[in-house]
Amino acid sequence: MSSIVEMTSQRETQTKLKHPIHVTSEIGTLRTVLLKRPGKEVENLIPEYLQRLLFDDIPYLPIIQREHDYFAETLKNRGIEVLYLEKLVVETLSNPEIKRQFVDDILRESKANINGAREVLKEYLLSFSTADMVDKVMSGILKREIEESKKTHLYELMEDHYPFYLDPMPNLYFTRDPAASIGNGLSINRMREPARRRESLFMEYIMKLHPRFAGYNVPVWLDRNYEFSIEGGDELVLSDEVVAIGVSARTSARAIERLALNLFKKQDSFKKVVAVEIPKCRAFMHLDTVFTMVDYDKFTIHPEIQSPQGKMNIYILEKGLDDEHVNITHRTNLQETLKEVLGLNELILIPCGGGDEIAASREQWNDGSNTLAISPGVVVTYDRNYISNDLLRQHGMEVIEILSSELSRGRGGPRCMSMPIVREDLYK
Ligand SMILES: NC(=O)NCCC[C@H](N)C(=O)O
């Protein structure tokens, strides 16, 4: 855990920055990013519950950690400040009263599995140091961890039935999804899948109570109590005026419209929200699994999101007559729509896997389209997607490859594993 001195100096750095969150594009030079190092939560994945926990296989912990450390080092070597979610949460909960409140909140949201065991679990969690308690909450609590004598319900004694009181949160290393920085604020998301819904509680606490963010009135464009779901993998900040949002298996049209209304009302630089409908399937769970921005005028795309005629369902939302209405217009051509909203004459879509039917499908499954831009034309990608990476290079990109054998098993790539906190503005 950081010392007060470290936290004070973090706060001084932030004061100089004026806005602790500042993201006005997908590609502006990345200054600060939030990651989560995969931990014991990954070892609590078992075959019976893989699908429910949104994994396709069980990563090998020492290797996934090594690969993640390599990712973090790659970013640090480029001068990017890396913040860790787990560390921010521990710092946020340093006050015992806040820690108790957090334990109450997390247990309430884990209600499906704890039923009558809440008091016992509360006592159990509070018996740990804050760092160990946070680790427990993230990695899950097994029924066998609680003394037999404290179990008063039949379901608690059925060890071979369902093993967890608190489910593990193995998707936490995909920091992109629970919250998304947009302009000087963020959306703290109601996540679609029950397996991930608790994840955004951490960000709510951090924004309200961590000294790096608390007291700066960081605007929350949409909070996690909103009834319709949205996830950060669908939220792409194309410029300081335009946000693209996927209408996907995870993100609802209603949440997009509400976010657009709030943005237009409260951060008036934003003029357009482009809603891009993508097929609702596991491989394409978010817009950023099939489409990312890599340079001012270049994007990756998985060709399968377009019809054979190259058509899609796209809607542009703009400020309406009053604060409760948006104007909506329909488009069908992604390339033309991007040119229109970004004011460009030319724009290149770089197809995943070079557009080859097999390579595109294989590399998209392993997040070949999911690039993290760290400045215009410089992207971090998985090494395994060699066809897509070569094609990016042929288009003049600098491609920084990271290790990907185990990280990719969770179905997310470098963009999914990172939440930009501060990016430099683009030159206009
Ligand atoms: N932005 C992203 O596409 N994130 C990847 C999330 C993968 C995770 N296993 C999930 O299904 O939510």
Image (cartoon, rainbow, N blue to C red):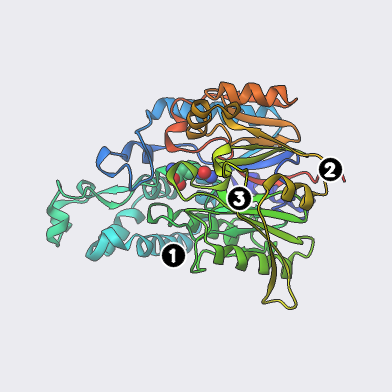
Q: Earlier in the sequence, mark 1 or mark 2?
A: 1
Q: Residue at x 67, y 38 (%)?
A: 81
User: Type of residue at label 2?
Assistant: Asn
Q: Which residue is identified by label 1?
A: 101
Distance from disc 2 to disc 3, alpha carbons, whole Å, reads 20 Å
Q: Quadrant of residue 243?
A: bottom right
Q: Is residue 414 above or below residue 251?
A: above
Q: Which residue is identified by label 3?
A: 312
Tag in front: 1 or 3: 3
Q: Earlier in the sequence, mark 1 or mark 3?
A: 1
Q: Earlier in the sequence, mark 2 or mark 3?
A: 3
Q: Is residue 106 above or below residue 303?
A: below
What x and y, as percent, mark residue 148? Answer: 14, 52
User: Type of residue at label 1?
Assistant: Gln
Residue nearer the viewer, 88 or 309 = 309
Tag in front: 2 or 3: 3
> SS of the residue at dot 2?
loop
Q: Using residue 32 as the reference point, say whether residue 162 is left or right of it.
A: left
What x and y, as percent, mark residue 162? Answer: 20, 50
> SS of the residue at dot 3?
loop
Q: Are marks 1 and 3 in contact (CB under 8 Å)?
A: no
> SS of the residue at dot 1?
helix
Q: Which residue is identified by label 2?
A: 345
Tag in front: 1 or 2: 2
